[in-house]
Image: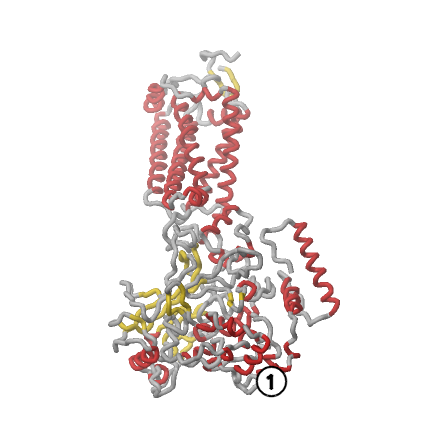
Amino acid sequence: MPHPPRRPSPPLLRRALQTLLGLLALPLALAQEPAAPPPTAGHGSYTIVHVAKSRRQTADHSKFKILKGPFKDSDGPAVTRACLTCHMKAAEQVMATSHWTWNIAKDGKDGFGKSTLLVNNYCISIIGGNTESCARCHAGYGFKDKGFDFTKQENVDCLVCHDTTGDYEKEKAGWPNPGVTLAEVAQKVGPPSNRNCGVCHFFGGGGDATKHGDLDDTILKAPRAEDVHMSKQGAGMDCIDCHASDAHKVGGPNYVVPADRREQAKFAGESVSRMSCAACHSDSPHKSYILNRHYQKVACQTCHIPAYARGTLPTNTFWDWASAGRLKNGRGYKEEDANGYEKYNSIHGEMIWARNVRPSYVWYNGTLKFTRLTDRINVPADGRVILNPAEGSYTDPNAKIWPFKFHEATQPFDPILKRFVAPYTAGSKGSGAYWGDWDWNVAIRKGMDTAGLPYSGQFSFVKTSMLWPVTHMVAPKEQALACVECHKRNGLLAQVPGFYLLGRDHGAGVDLLGFGVILLTILGVGIHGFIRTTQGRH
Amino acid sequence: MRRVVLYEGFERFWHWAQALLIITMMLTGFEVRGLGLHLFGFQRAVALHNILAVTLLVLIVFAIFWHVTTGEWRQYIPTRKFLREMIAFYVTGIFKGAPHPVRKHRMAKLNPLQRLAYFGFKVLIIPVQVTSGALYYYYPNLQHTLGWPPASLWVIAVVHVLGAFGLVAFLIGHVYLTTTGHTPLTNIKAMLTGWEELEDDAYFDET
């Protein structure tokens, strides 16, 4: 397949390319190979691309005897052992990635990632005893506490990423649901589709659409207006078209390493993820010179994702742990608001959900400064701790104005040690877990003991915010922000500091001075004219 | 009294085209600045402002060529001769029906105050607006290649805006003073048709 052209090609070339694509697809159509999905409106490349992708596979996994099993229910490691007989280096590769380690360390920065000291604004932390529940999304089998063997190759879960049937499901500690017939799934493995990524990444924060705001499972059937790239009426792209992998390392940002936004490979054959819009669209995709120059300081996403949560699902914008634990007759309960969104649940407190939310805009150079359970926190005067402030400013050549989902919360805090805490939340009555016994002090004590961290015995609640870069759900160009949304007083960039913005900034007194001069001129002319006319001459 | 062509075809075209361009640029400029005008919409106002700026530059190049080749540029050389009389005329004489201290002539159609005002307009306001406008437009390049700090854009913008306010004040005074001719519309008619009635005893002889 030819790559999409980097720059808008002349019509002749484009027509030639289209003809070429058509000719490539012709034999396929004649051969009546795998029943192609019906042709779609819009971009139209979806069908061709996906037929081509399936044609590229050189092995039919349903023919391999070793994958016929039968495998015992939930015996994921047996499937992995079968996979490893051919793909003998695959587990080793996976084990080097953050999908496996849930732990990022780089340049002397240690303890970032879910399995270690990172503090999150939703479920706070997994290491206070919640690992077993949270590891449903771990690309492995048996991760239930810190005793997990991260070196055992058969613990790698191949199926969660390579299942093409949609039947595969994971349970606590990442074990396969016993209802899944593993042999059937194993015989139909293939490259990861949007569904594979989505089973975890759409459900961050404990539920569909909860965490990111720009990622939820409506993307799988998105109309073009929701996501021009992922929609089958749009470009029909897969997650991995941009998040390209290199030896199982999927391109993307993690806590201390920003996304690789390079637009071109350094040498032929280098695997570069296409995390930058410009990698496909070039850095000057507009007809207007002025619009193209915005590229230096404004992320494409800022104008082209005018709102997040544009599907049918609401995303969580506020999570108030401080109000958790109200009980009715000694039991937890839930309440819904008029939209049917959960506004209160005893297990996590008051919540606010929203659809179609305008992002907040912040200077961002790709680095978010995350907070760990061991970091000493000075609570600012407004009482609001930003867990992952974005780095960057106008003068930072790598920084651009980016759209973010600001997630607000309150969460428990140790005011004596000035640290965040990892409460034990997911457990039954009598376990000491908050959702079983409704006692923060016990839950925190228990959690911190499990995590091996100190706890002073006192807790309070502080307001916390977390920034989520908005980069998916790119809207069709007709929906992009109009210039005047920012270029006006009190526009969308009213709070973005460090530069003069046309239409927003006026300079104290400049207009006053100008209008003063005009007024004086009118006054002078008026008086002169008045005397002239009343004198009746000239 | 006799009728002569005081303003030639190109001169009139130049004058009115410049007037139209500058007034439209005032409107688009003030809309873009966010002073409450909503005529074109921000994006179209910006595009129009920039296109008109280039158009005006082209017009200015032609006008300079015309002034140089015809020698008409001499009309704008400032002079102190009769300057005091002119000021006195506008401050007091005009109210008493005193005669105009300077007579118009084909070779001296501007009075000393006009010379001063138009000279200032041509060598000060317009160059300041053109320069600050160009710096404004190319600021990202200047910042990128020369490392101009963010604050410099503010300075450029303030200069450009003050220049624009100055132009508005100029326009008001200019239009008002056109009404001080023989009748309120005499001067505007002359600028439209080119013809104006001059007194016979002018110093220079046309023929």
Disc 1 is attached to a residue of which chain?
A
In the image, residue A473 lies at what x, y percent?
Answer: 51, 63
Viewer-side residue, B94 vs A319? A319
| Residue bearing mark 1 | A69
> What colour scheme governs how the chains and residues are painted in the rendered image of this protein?
secondary structure
x, y percentage for residue A79? 56, 81
Q: Please say if A105 is above or below B112.
A: below
Residue furthest right in the image: A30
Q: How many marks?
A: 1
The residue lying at 35 percent from left, 24 percent from top is B90
B30, A366: nearer the viewer: A366
Residue furthest out toward the left: A416
Q: Quadrant of the N terminus of chain A?
A: bottom right
Where is residue A3 shown, x and y percent of the image? 61, 58
Quarter in which the C terminus of chain A is drawn: top left
Left or right of residue A507, residue A35 in this image = right
Question: Taking A534 as reference, is A244 left or right?
Answer: right
Asked if residue B29 can be seen in this view, the reply is no
Name above or below for residue A330 compared with residue A294.
below
For image coordinates 48% across by 33% down, the residue present is B19
Few, some or many C-alpha atoms within 10 Å of disc 1 (few <14, some 14-19, many ≥20)?
some
Residue in the picture at 51% in, 44% down: B47
A276 horizontally vs A321: left or right: right
- Label 1: state its secondary structure: loop
Residue A377 appears in the picture as rendered: yes
Q: Position of residue B157 (x, y in %)?
A: 39, 42
> In the figure, A263 relative to A322: above or below?
above
Q: Nearer the viewer, residue B27 or A309?
A: A309
Residue type highlighted by circle 1: Gly
